[in-house]
Every structure is written in structure tokens, then in C-alpha cells.
């Protein structure tokens, strides 16, 4: 209801706006336009650098290598080879197994440390976190190389143990096999895996634990019934962030894997290198990506089922 | 106070994903007045204020400030300034840096700007604070710096978004009076958003009561309190007793109503306001009810009840009277003029309520 | 007298010991590099044979190494600046504006973090080859941008998220246009985050191997150079010296960046709001 004052003056009409003003008015009306305008340079670069190459990769996978040129007729040849030659699938499965083991080891090892910093450290949490995570940002190549040197035939462990008189001859089983790969990768990711777990533990409202204690639960049960479930998002995030890149790793299997420890990444690299069959390499890469995605989806579905059953 | 309208809001709507936060608002705000937007949270008052500032654009409708259309004018070019709810004091600048922030474009020499900053500091009663760091200020001090920062630019309109909400009660009351005095001395139009009806009534020339995106009534404080036009406004401002009734007849400046548990009511009204037989709501303020322990002589505008609990508030008492046929007690407010409080020890005793014809507000039945 | 319940709860205890061992596990193998870089032997084995700075001398006098170092600095510097700019723009857009489809957009930008690097490397390689683009430091730079922009965006999002939005609105309200508001309000407050982002992205680019390996032309970056040296046992200690140096410098840089970022957070938290 309008106040008692008289009729509104007629002289105020809706203004006639010029084009620039109309654009400006529209931009003000739709803040999503402004948002996307700001986002566009980044989006364009990412599209050019990521989407287009992937698209080309997919296209390439449907061509075949014809000695020195590409036969550009669309064919599923590469994919057929991929499934027929046992080595590719075997290697893919082995890679998934290895990175699965790495993920498991890394997350299990990182969790207690994350818990410690989140719950037991009162001052200087930052210092602990920095100490633990900084090594992750240093050269991955150098860290893998360090392990090669540590596990080697004449390496640190062997020469150390011999010097100490614990063993007579160097241990041969510690290098150039899948186990070495798992150890090295677990070490490489240990510094990083702790972060997502720490973040979700840190977010847990401490009064929830006090409530559990008040209601009669001891520390172990409180952990199992309150802390662990609430930290699951962090654990899952950590697992995914470790599992996915590890499956396609190249450096570690190359340096410490030996003939038995190679993974799918090495095959892809050689197809683009010495073996010189780019289309097959592309197909292998895409199949690996699809397979990894499948495994991840299965993992997420599985955790959702568990969560629903428990909750 | 000149009669010119400085702000015209015409048919303004604002939709957020299908929800109308502001629903067909038409307002004219006069130059130099202290105008408040009052309502519960979610009623659209802050959205409306932000549209005046330019941070939201109306989905439909137009806003004019000083007869200039604002639709294509971004916030940094509008002749208005805002005091934000969180104060938005720049943490990386000191007090002088904050207050002088908007003066960069003014072209004035530094000495002149500094002089003005000192003037503002005097005005907000924080002299000597110029070099103090922003992070060292208390809540009340931040609020004043935010005020000074906006006023130094001498805007045509000052917008205030619940600026006193974070302050404790005594400080808030003090600031209310100070803001009011400031507005009068500076002469700038203030548009003030609040959910606190006492605050709005204390400070404003006129108040627009809003609910669910609509403006229900625009009136001076006394008009809103004494003559609310909707049940929402009657209930939102102060306390109100409501009774359902049916109109019996009217004429000669009064209407007779059969008000159920309240008995027969005669109210002073303009002629022909409500037709016979129509449903109506009778509303009476607690302080307009007279409570006696003996029956007064009239047969109209009287009802008998039973004394309920009483609350002693020092300067006044809130008493509750039960009427037969009604669960909810009637709220009565009485000044404790004498030494002892009225009715404190009279629980369950029979009492009579009476009131004058002009003490009644009639509202359309809903 | 046994400890009270709260004392037991807060004790350093078993978990603390575990965490220290965890730290030792993380640092242990890495410390091999500095330790043996001073060792007077081309074999990385116990017992230690004596102190020498020979390997550091060799490293400094190696022209290939110096060239690779310059290349890494060039690429790292450029990538750091560009990815921080792009990441900041994206972070501002995402935190400041209501946009439909924001989730998928952010997800898309973060995609490089979850795609195995080797796949990104070959995808870019294929694109370069079909597009007739020769491999060079430029192609390496593009690859690194892909990796660094998401990181820059994440750092800047966490920085901008707690930012009082009304600070920028206040700037606008007081008469500054959006560019000036950025320079006078947003930028000064975002500087700690920007510095952290620059240092982080520089480090990522400097240390990155796989993408550089696939996308390098005649000019190589330092990690690729190191890789080429790994086949030669005599070059081994030189690599150790180089590695030890890189690790130390990176360590210092990242610690600094993290400290800077966290300190920025503290300042921001204590000053925002009108309460």
C-alpha cells in the first residue's frame, strides 16, 4: 500500500538506453555473465590444452600405423589388438593391482599420522604438516632415484647390512620387482596422502566425541563409531588422489621395477617411443583411462553401499 | 524537509531461481528523511537495499535516484553510499586510509583530504584515531569508521544495512540516538534496514513494513503503531490482542461489532468502512485496556475475566487476563505509578477490562 | 598416581612415536642424496669413504647441466606467473559469482590432477605432432600450465573463500570501478596467496619430469637432463650433488610458501567481519 502522498510524477519514465548501456544493464542483471567472462581465459586455455589433445588422442586410436604413416580409415584394429594380445590386459590388471596395493599401504600408513596431528597436537600443527608434506613437493624423480640407490645391489641397505655384518651377500630381492615399485610409490605418495585425511579429521566437531564419551563409549568405540565414519570423505579423496595417477606411472617402474615390475605406463611410453606405434599407444592409453574410471566408479559405489548399510 | 522524492522505486521485482525475494514494490522516499525498511528475516528488505546500492539488479521494474534511472548505472557510479552489515573495514589500511578510501577520485589535494578525515573523526567522536590500524578497532569503533567512510563523500543517500545488530544493548541504544542526531544535522536521506521494530520506531521519520517481498504499510512510527492496516503489521509492531468478530452495523462515526468473547464493541471509525455482516478482526493494544477489580458501569466496551499471571517489569507490569471461551489470555500493560505493582497478588480473581472507542483498531478478516 | 583421563587423552604417546617414525620414513631415503653427495666414491654404498666437494665442482662445471638449469628456470618462471594469473581469475569467478554449471566447470579445470601424467603427455605430443608444432620449451611450458593452473586455482580459492565479499562491494560503493577495486582491495589482501601460488607452481614446473620428457625438443629441462645422466655410473655422484642441491632449495622455497600462505590466512581471519 502506497503512502498518503499524492500521485507519482509523470516525468519519470523507463529510460531509453543505448546499446552499450543495455549490454551493461544485462551484465548487471545476470551475474553469471560476469562470472563466465572472468572464467573464460582459463577455460579457453584448458580447452585448448586438455580437451582438444584428448579428442585428437581418441581420433588417433581409431587409425592404424602403416609403417611410417597413418592409415586414416576408421577402424577398431588397435582395440582388437589390445584385447587379443594378452600382454596389454595382463599389464593393465597388474598395474591396477600394484597401485591398489600402493593406495592401501599409503592410506593405512598415513591415517594414524593424520590422526595424531589433528587430535593430539595442540600447538604448531602447521609445523608438523609442513614437515610432513614438504618432501612431496620436491622432485619426484629424485625421490625415486634415491630409492633405487637405497635398494640397489651395491646400494645403501645392502652395503649397510654387510658392513654391520648382518648379512654376507647382498640381498637380491629388494630391487627390480613389483615389491620395490610398491615401496617406492608408497613412499612417494606418503607425504601427500596425509593431507585430505587430515583435513577431514580436523573438521570433526570435537563436541561429538565428548558426547559419545558422555553416552558411555570408550575411546576405541568412539573412534570406530564417530571419528572413522566422519573421516571417510577424506580417506576416499586421499585414495582416489593416490590411485589414479599411480596406475599410469612411468618413472618408478622404469627405475626400480626391472622386467617384472613394469606397468602399463611403460608400455604406452614405448609405443610412443621405440616401438613407434602411436595409434596403438593411443588406444592403450584410452583403454587404461576407461578402465581406471571403471575401477574408481566401482570403488565409489562400493563405499556408498557400505555407508548406507552402516548408517 | 522538502517534499521532493529523492528515491522512486517503481514496480520492482527480484527473483532468485523462482523465488520472489522482492515482489512488486513501489516506494517514494523523500529528500532528507530517515526512512526505515522493517521486517523479519527473509522479507526482502536487504535485497531491496542492495538494489538501491546497485549490487543486485531488479528482475523487473525501475529504480530512480534523484530522477535518474539506475538500471545501467553500476554501484561505483551511483550517488549513494552504504554502511555494510559486517562494516567491511579494509584490514590492510589504517583508519585514515579507510575513511579517505573513496576520496581518491575527488581530485582534492592530500592535505585537504586529511583535513576532511579529521573533521569526520570529530563527528564520529573518535578524534586522534587516524593512524590506528583497522584490525585494532572494537565493533562499535568499526561501525563508526564505516559511517565516516561513507559520509565523507557526501552522498545523496546513505544506505545502512542493519548496522547496529552486532552491538550490545546499551551501545545500540546510544548509537540509535547518535545516528538520528547525525542524520538531522547532516541532512542526508538515510535508508535504514532493520528487523528490530523498536529501533525503527525510535529513529525513523517513516517506516515501510515488509513481509515476503511486499511492502505492507508505509507510515510514520505513530501511524504504524496506532493505525496498522494489516494483521501482520499490527502483530509485528509491539504487542497486540486480536479478537474475531462480525459487524452489526455502523454510522455516525462508529461501528458496532459482535466480538464473541469480548462482548459488544463499539469502535470509532470512518463511515462505511465495513459493511454489516462482514467478518472483522478487533485489535487492542495492551496499554489501552483498563483493568479494574469492580465492574465499571458501561454495557459496551467492557468484559469480565479472570486474573492470570503477572510479570513485574519495574516501571510497568504485564498482566494476563483469561476470558471465558478463549484459551489465550489477553495481554494488559499498566504503569506502576504507585509504590506497589498492580495485580501481582490477585491471581484467579474476577477482573473487568474496559477501553475507549478510539482505542480499537479494526482490520479486515483474513 | 595414574594420569587423569584428559591427561591420558592428550599424551604424545604411541601415536606420536608412530608419527615420528613416519616422518623418518619420509625423509630417510631422501637424505641419502645429500649424505652421499659428499662421499668420496662413485658408489653409493657404505662404508663412507671420506668427505669431498669434487662432485659439486663437477656439477657446476657441467655445461649441459647449466643449460638445462637455465631452461628449467625460464619455463618455471613463465609457467608460475601465467598459471597463477589464470588460476586467480578462475578462483575469483568461482567464489564471487553465482553461476549455473559451476561444479562441472571447476571439475573440468581440476581434471589434470586426476589424469595420469603420461596420458596428458602423449595427448599433447599427439596434438603437437598433428598440428605440426615442433617440440620445444614452449610445448613443455604448455604441458606444465595444464598441471599448474588447477593447483593455482585451488590455492587462490581457499584464499578468496574466507574473504569478506562485502570488502569488494564496499570498494565499489565508494566509487572505485572494478579494476581499481581489484588493485586497491583484492590484490593487497590476496598477495600472500599469490606468492604461495607462484612458489608452488614454480616448484611443480621445475621438478616435473614426465611431461617435460615427452614434450622436449632439443632444449631440455633439468629433470630430463638428470634422467639422461642416470645411465652412466660415473656421472652418478654428480647427479647426487645436483639432486641434493635441488632438494635443499626446493625445501626452503616450499616451506617459505606454506608459511606465507598460512600467515596470510591468520591475518585475514582475525580482521574480517564487523563483530
Image: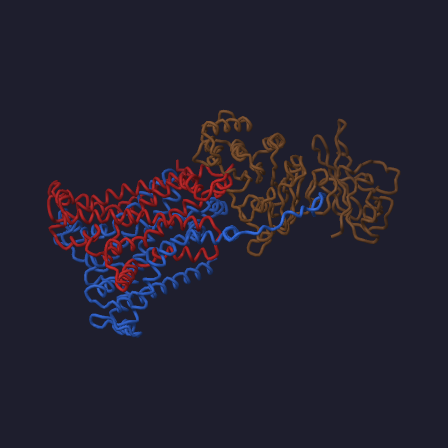
Chain colours: A blue, B brown, C red
Residue B318, can we see it? yes
- Residue A191 placement (x, y as % from top left): 31, 49
The residue closer to the viewer here, C45 or B132, is B132
Image quadrant where residue B277 sits: bottom right
State the count of labels. 0
Is residue A208 left or right of B265 when viewed as pictured? left
- Residue B123 placement (x, y as % from top left): 56, 27
Question: Which residue occupies the extreme top position in the image?
Answer: B128
The residue closer to the viewer here, C89 or B341, is C89
Residue depicted at 23% across the width and 66% down the height:
A271
The residue closer to the viewer here, B41 or A74, is A74
Is residue B279 left or right of B92 when viewed as pictured? right
Is residue C164 left or right of A170 when viewed as pictured? right
The residue closer to the viewer here, A212 or B35, is B35
Is residue C208 left or right of C158 when viewed as pictured? left
- Residue B21 placement (x, y as % from top left): 59, 51
Residue A179, can we see it? no
Against C72, residue A310 (above or below) is below
Residue depicted at 12% across the width and 52% down the height:
C233
- Residue C158 placement (x, y as % from top left): 41, 46
Amino acid at each position: 500500500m502506497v503512502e498518503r502522498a499524492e500521485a507519482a510524477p509523470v516525468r519519470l519514465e523507463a529510460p531509453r538506453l543505448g546499446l552499450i548501456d543495455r549490454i551493461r544493464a544485462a551484465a548487471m542483471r545476470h551475474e553469471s555473465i560476469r562470472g563466465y567472462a572472468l572464467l573464460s581465459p582459463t577455460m579457453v586455455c584448458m580447452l585448448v590444452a586438455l580437451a582438444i589433445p584428448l579428442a585428437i588422442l581418441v581420433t588417433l586410436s581409431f587409425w592404424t600405423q602403416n609403417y611410417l604413416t597413418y592409415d586414416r580409415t576408421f577402424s577398431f584394429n588397435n582395440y582388437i589388438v589390445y584385447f587379443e594380445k594378452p600382454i596389454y590386459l595382463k599389464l593393465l590388471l597388474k598395474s591396477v593391482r600394484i597401485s591398489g596395493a600402493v593406495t592401501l599401504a599409503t592410506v593405512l600408513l598415513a591415517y594414524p599420522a593424520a590422526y595424531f596431528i589433528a587430535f593430539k597436537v595442540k600447538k604448531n600443527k602447521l609445523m608438523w604438516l609442513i614437515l610432513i608434506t614438504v618432501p612431496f613437493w620436491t622432485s619426484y624423480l629424485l625421490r625415486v632415484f634415491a630409492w633405487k640407490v637405497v635398494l640397489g645391489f651395491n646400494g645403501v641397505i645392502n652395503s649397510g647390512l654387510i658392513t654391520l655384518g648382518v648379512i654376507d651377500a647382498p640381498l637380491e630381492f629388494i630391487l627390480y620387482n613389483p615389491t620395490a615399485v610398491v615401496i617406492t610409490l608408497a613412499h612417494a605418495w606418503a607425504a601427500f596422502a596425509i593431507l585430505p585425511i587430515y583435513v577431514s579429521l580436523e573438521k570433526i566437531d570435537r563436541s561429538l566425541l565428548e558426547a559419545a564419551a558422555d553416552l558411555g563409549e570408550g575411546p576405541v568405540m568412539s573412534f570406530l563409531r564417530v571419528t572413522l565414519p566422519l573421516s571417510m570423505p577424506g580417506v576416499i579423496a586421499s585414495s582416489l588422489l593416490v590411485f589414479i595417477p599411480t596406475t599410469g606411472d612411468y618413472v618408478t617402474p622404469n627405475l626400480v621395477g626391472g622386467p617384472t615390475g613394469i606397468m602399463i605406463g611403460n608400455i604406452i611410453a614405448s609405443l610412443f617411443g621405440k616401438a613407434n606405434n602411436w595409434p596403438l599407444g593411443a588406444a592403450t592409453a584410452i583403454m587404461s583411462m576407461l578402465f581406471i574410471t571403471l575401477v574408481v566408479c566401482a570403488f565409489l559405489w562400493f563405499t556408498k553401499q557400505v555407508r548406507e548399510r552402516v548408517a | 524537509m522538502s517534499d521532493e522524492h529523492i528515491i522512486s522505486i517503481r514496480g520492482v521485482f527480484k527473483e532468485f531461481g523462482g523465488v520472489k525475494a522482492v515482489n512488486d514494490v513501489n516506494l517514494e522516499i523523500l529528500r532528507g528523511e530517515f526512512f526505515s525498511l522493517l521486517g523479519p528475516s527473509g522479507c526482502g528488505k536487504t535485497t531491496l537495499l542492495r538494489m538501491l546500492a546497485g549490487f543486485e539488479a531488479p528482475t523487473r521494474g525501475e529504480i530512480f535516484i534523484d530522477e535518474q534511472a539506475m538500471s545501467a548505472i553500476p554501484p561505483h557510479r551511483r550517488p549513494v553510499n552504504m554502511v555494510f552489515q559486517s562494516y567491511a573495514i579494509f584490514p590492510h589500511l589504517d583508519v585514515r586510509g579507510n575513511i579517505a578510501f573513496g576520496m581518491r577520485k575527488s581530485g582534492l589535494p592530500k592535505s585537504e583530504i586529511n583535513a576532511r578525515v579529521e573533521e569526520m573523526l570529530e563527528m564520529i567522536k573518535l578524534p586522534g584515531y587516524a593512524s590506528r590500524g583497522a584490525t585494532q578497532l572494537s565493533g562499535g569503533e568499526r561501525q563508526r569508521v564505516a559511517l565516516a567512510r561513507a559520509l565523507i563523500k557526501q552522498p545523496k543517500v546513505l544506505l545502512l544495512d542493519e548496522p547496529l545488530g552486532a552491538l550490545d544493548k546499551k551501545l545500540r541504544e546510544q548509537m540509535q540516538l547518535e545516528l538520528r542526531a547525525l542524520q538531522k544535522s547532516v541532512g542526508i536521506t538515510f535508508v535504514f534496514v532493520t528487523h528490530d521494530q523498536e529501533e525503527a520506531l525510535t529513529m525513523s521519520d517513516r517506516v515501510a513494513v515488509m513481509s515476503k517481498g511486499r511492502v505492507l504499510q508505509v507510515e510514520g512510527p505513530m501511524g504504524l503503531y496506532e493505525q496498522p492496516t494489516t494483521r501482520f503489521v499490527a502483530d509485528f509492531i509491539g504487542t497486540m490482542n486480536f479478537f474475531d468478530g462480525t459487524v452489526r452495523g455502523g454510522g455516525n462515526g462508529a461501528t458496532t461489532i459482535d466480538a464473541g468473547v469480548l462482548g459488544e464493541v463499539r469502535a470509532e471509525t470512518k463511515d462505511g468502512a465495513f459493511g454489516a455482516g462482514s467478518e472483522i478482526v478487533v485489535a487492542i493494544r495492551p496499554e489501552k485496556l483498563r483493568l479494574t477489580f469492580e465492574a465499571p458501569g458501561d454495557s459496551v466496551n467492557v468484559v469480565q475475566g479472570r486474573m492470570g499471571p503477572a510479570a513485574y517489569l519495574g516501571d510497568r507490569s504485564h498482566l494476563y487476563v483469561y476470558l471465558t471461551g478463549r484459551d489465550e489470555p489477553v495481554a494488559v500493560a499498566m504503569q506502576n505509578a504507585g509504590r506497589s505493582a498492580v495485580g501481582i497478588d490477585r491471581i484467579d480473581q474476577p477482573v473487568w477490562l474496559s477501553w475507549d472507542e478510539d482505542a480499537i483498531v479494526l482490520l479486515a478478516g483474513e | 598416581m595414574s594420569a587423569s583421563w584428559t591427561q591420558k587423552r592428550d599424551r604424545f604417546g604411541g601415536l606420536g612415536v608412530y608419527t615420528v617414525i613416519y616422518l623418518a620414513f619420509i625423509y630417510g631415503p631422501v637424505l641419502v642424496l645429500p649424505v652421499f653427495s659428499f662421499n668420496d666414491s662413485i658408489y653409493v654404498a657404505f662404508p663412507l669413504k671420506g668427505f669431498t666437494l669434487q662432485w659439486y665442482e663437477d656439477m657446476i662445471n657441467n655445461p649441459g647441466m647449466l643449460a638445462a638449469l637455465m631452461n628449467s628456470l625460464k619455463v618455471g618462471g613463465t609457467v608460475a606467473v601465467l598459471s597463477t594469473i589464470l588460476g586467480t581469475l578462475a578462483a575469483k569467478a568461482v567464489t564471487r559469482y553465482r553461476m549455473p554449471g559451476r561444479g562441472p566447470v571447476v571439475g573440468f579445470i581440476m581434471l589434470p590432477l586426476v589424469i595420469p601424467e603420461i596420458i596428458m603427455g602423449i595427448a599433447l605430443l599427439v596434438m603437437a605432432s598433428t598440428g605440426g608444432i615442433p617440440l620445444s620449451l614452449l610445448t613443455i611450458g604448455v604441458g606444465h600450465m595444464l598441471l599448474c593452473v588447477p593447483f593455482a586455482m585451488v590455492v587462490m580459492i581457499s584464499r578468496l573463500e574466507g574473504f569478506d565479499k562485502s570488502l569488494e562491494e564496499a570498494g565499489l560503493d565508494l566509487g572505485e570501478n572494478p579494476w581499481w577495486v581489484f588493485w586497491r582491495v583484492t590484490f593487497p589482501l590476496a598477495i600472500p596467496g599469490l606468492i604461495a601460488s607462484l612458489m608452488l607452481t614454480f616448484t611443480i614446473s621445475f621438478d616435473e619430469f614426465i611431461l617435460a620428457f615427452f614434450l622436449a625438443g632439443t632444449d631440455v629441462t633439468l629433470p630430463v637432463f638428470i634422467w639422461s645422466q642416470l645411465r652412466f655410473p660415473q656421472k652418478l655422484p654428480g647427479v647426487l650433488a645436483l639432486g641434493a642441491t635441488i632438494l635443499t632449495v626446493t625445501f626452503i622455497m616450499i616451506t617459505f610458501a606454506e608459511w606465507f600462505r598460512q600467515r596470510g590466512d591468520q591475518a585475514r581471519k582475525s580482521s574480517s567481519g564487523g563483530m
